[in-house]
Image (cartoon, coloured by chain):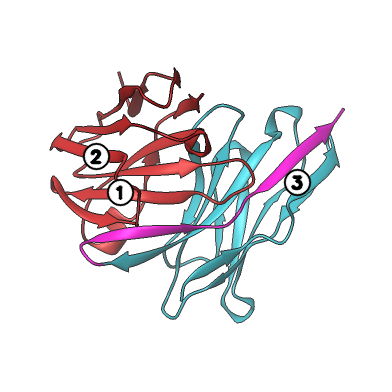
Chain colours: A cyan, B red
Amino acid sequence: AQSVTQPDIHITVSEGASLELRCNYSYGATPYLFWYVQSPGQGLQLLLKYFSGDTLVQGIKGFEAEFKRSQSSFNLRKPSVHWSDAAEYFCAVGAPSGGYNKLIFGAGTRLAVHP
Amino acid sequence: ETGVTQTPRHLVMGMTNKKSLKCEQHLGHNAMYWYKQSAKKPLELMFVYSLEERVENNSVPSRFSPECPNSSHLFLHLHTLQPEDSALYLCASSLSGGLAGGIEQFFGPGTRLTVL
């Protein structure tokens, strides 16, 4: 069965520090992978996606993620975190299901940023 | 309006009330989704409509009743809810069919529901 694991429930970093959020997936075929961000009281906003090709993908707000098939991972990175990056981050894998395409989400990682 | 909109943004209702949540997408999509997001739980997919037909109903209690009158609008009708139904209800839309083109979902801001 398809699944997504985000091992870190909470992460705290200092403003200006680098960030890496971990994501591991279980999926039998070539995965379609996503990172979404959710600010408090808001919906989910797509940060970046991987469908195929270059395994390092760039997204909005200075984020990037690297797909590593051998490790079944799709970790999200940012070289220098801003206070406005404090939010919850969700990794997801896309999978066909009946007549539509399903997104399977991880439980999320809540990021706090210290000034 | 652009993207996916949801109304109301906040709703407080008693257990005997009947209310409806509304979602509208302005993206030309033809698949729409309802998710439930509770504290400390992963997102739960509730319903999926593709080309205005319900294609997924994830064992959701009958007190939740979805309606999709056209590809731009999605409703969630609520009646005799329980306090544990309090959550953020998110609507999303996408293209239907074809993995690469249809799999990315765009989310609305959600309706924060409190059941007293």
Please report, as a chain letter, where disc 1 is located: B
Q: Are marks 3 and 1 on the same chain?
A: no
Q: Is residue A113 magenta?
A: yes
Q: CA distance from mark 2 to mark 3?
A: 43 Å
Q: Residue at x 31, y 23 (%)?
A: B19
Helix, strand or loop status at disc 3 = loop
Residue type of the residue flagged with mark 3: Pro
Q: Which mark is residue B47?
A: 1
Q: CA distance from mark 3 to mark 1?
A: 38 Å
Residue A71's x, y, as percent? 64, 77
Viewer-side residue, A76 vs B29: B29
The quadrant in which residue A4 appears is bottom right
- Dominant SS of magenta comes to strand
Q: Nearer the observer, disc 2 or disc 3?
A: 2
Q: Which mark is residue A74?
A: none
Q: Is residue B49 magenta?
A: no
Q: Residue at x 21, y 59 (%)?
A: B97
Residue that badge 3 annotates: A79
Q: Which mark is residue B66?
A: 2
Residue type of the residue flagged with mark 2: Pro
**Where B103 falls versus B24 (above or below)?**
below
**Where A91 falls versus B93 (above or below)?**
below
Viewer-side residue, B39 vs B24: B39
Mark 2 or mark 1: name the one nearer the start of the chain.
1
Query: Where does the magenta region start and end?
Result: A98-115
